[in-house]
Image (cartoon, helix red, strand yellow):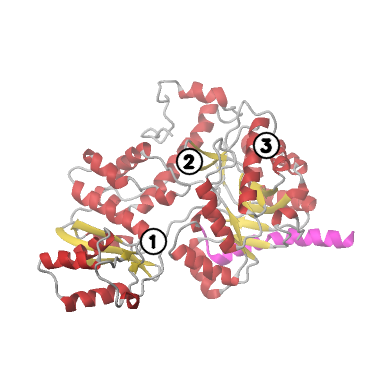
Amino acid sequence: MPANDFNGMTDYGIGIGLRVPHYNHILTEKPTVDWFEIISENFMVDGGRPLRILEQILEQYRVVQHGVSMYFGSAEPLNREHLKKLKRLVKRTNTPWLSDHLCWGSVDGRYTHDLLPMPYTFAAAKVTARKIREARDFLEVPIAVENVSSYAEFHVSEMTEWEFLAEVVEQADCGILLDVNNIYVSSQNHNFNPYDYLNFIPAERVAQFHIAGHSKYERFILDTHDHAVIDPVWKLYAHAIARTGKTATLLEWDARIPSFDEVHNEALKANRYLEAIEEKTAAA
Amino acid sequence: MQPLTADGDMRPRWRDGRSMKKVATGFIKPNDRLNSFERLEIYNRQYWYRIKDCFYEDYPGLRAILGEDRFERLALAYLEQYPSESFTLRNLGRRLVGFLEANPRLIKPLQKPAVDMARLEWAHIEAFDNEARPRLQVDSLLGADPDKVQLGLQPHLTLLQLGYELDNFLVKLRHGQALRSEASNAMTQRRVGQRRPIKKHLRPKSISLAVHRHDDTVYYKRLQPAQFRLLSAFKSGATLTEACEMLAESGDLDAEQIKKWFETWASLGWFCEPE
């Protein structure tokens, strides 16, 4: 896997999200998994079972932190107390890079616990990039921002989502956690060509991929993470890694979670695309 | 975020009376399948599904006491007044007890068991992941001046006096339920639950409890009244002498018995350095 500044010069392979229903299986069966992604907020606690489980996981596995509440796109400044808690966890996990979303979700100290889409303006990009840099400097770990799935677009936007993502990561000099399922979901909801997105983003900044399933409704698609990955998303993934090279890839499955083996096997399907890239590289 | 209508739709008017269609049209683009209002409505719905889902998971006991419909009304009223002010949904119920005490009409005629259950369920949340500080070694107290010795109690330990045997009620109810965890970027489905309150198991009886964590499991330990008074005295910063004098005044001072209590509490790791 290509190591770069944005994933801490690591070469992680295929991982899965660490989820509560799988704890017992993982700790007793100790399956071979390249790495686990944890939701940082689930472990930003002062004690108890979450931290005990994490310690046991860390004894056996490599862990990467993924956050859901940094809200780089919110207008208010970063929360110092939040950052301090996050840094304590970073030191505990030794995560080689840390990701959170390119979104907003809090205002005046009130939290939506959602990943809300941003207006794609130059002013928003500037504020967001500054906050990412501040967080990286404080946490002392590379940061990758993830594109979110969305259901709304704003009149005030001055550019496309992929132009905005590129603008932010260039200004922040940070990495990208590219969620190809989110690109697919948004492309369906907003009528754009997902390959335009993939072809535009700065491939050298991609630190990690997310893949996941979603739910299709009559008039829109919801990003539910409760299904296997569909073929069009795998095709996007194949196209993306053809640009980036082999890159750390993680399957998210967050609702109606099946057995550990089913989730892991779904994630390992990424191997067929990664191996194809490897063969092409070798042939070249 | 405005609550949804009874049908689960976004309200047609904003708080100031403006048409939500106009408001949404002003800043959200429509597409060929959804107008601006409908696109905003997706987020409005997801907010309430997510936040209520968490509230439901954290308060199964209160939900059982009040029944589905009344709990739903309570959840809406509470979450509208006290939206989340924390990065974690774990803290969503932080103000619930105070809210219930200030709004008895929402839980009438079950105010007492409902407030007690909210206190117990918040204590459970605190016990689950609050800090466990280094245990105080009782040997370290040997030779110390009892007029100066203060005993801290673990941050995960809450002392409660309840008017009902809600500990047994909640243990039965929670049995088999999964732990909550937050997910990344995933939307929430609507939940369906029981509709009728469970009143028949609520028998009034005064009990004292220590809600605490031991080996990563939350326990509800019954306390005798004298035990509760003693631990409460320590919690409020009383010295060993002051706490024992308080017990002596109430005629509860039995040195042998108190020694056994201390041995038990120390073995459970309840004592730590006071803050």
The answer to whether tags 3 and 2 share a subunit is yes
Numbered badge on residue A161: 3
Q: Quadrant of residue B218?
A: bottom left
Q: Amino acid at mark 3?
A: Glu
* Residue shown at the point (51%, 32%) measured from the top left: B40
Q: Range of the magenta residues?
A: A255-284
Q: Secondary structure at mark 2?
A: strand
Query: Which is in the foreground here, disc 3 or disc 2?
Result: 2
Q: CA distance from mark 1 to mark 3?
A: 41 Å
Numbered badge on residue A112: 2
Q: Quadrant of residue B257?
A: bottom left
Instruction: Kindly identify which chain the residue marked by label 1 belongs to.
Output: B
State yes or no: residue A271 in magenta: yes
Where is residue A48? Give x, y as percent.
43, 64
Where is residue B202? Give x, y as percent.
18, 56
**Residue A272 to residue A236: above or below:** below
Dot 2, how many residues are within 10 Å of its Cα: few (below 14), some (14-19), or many (20+)?
many
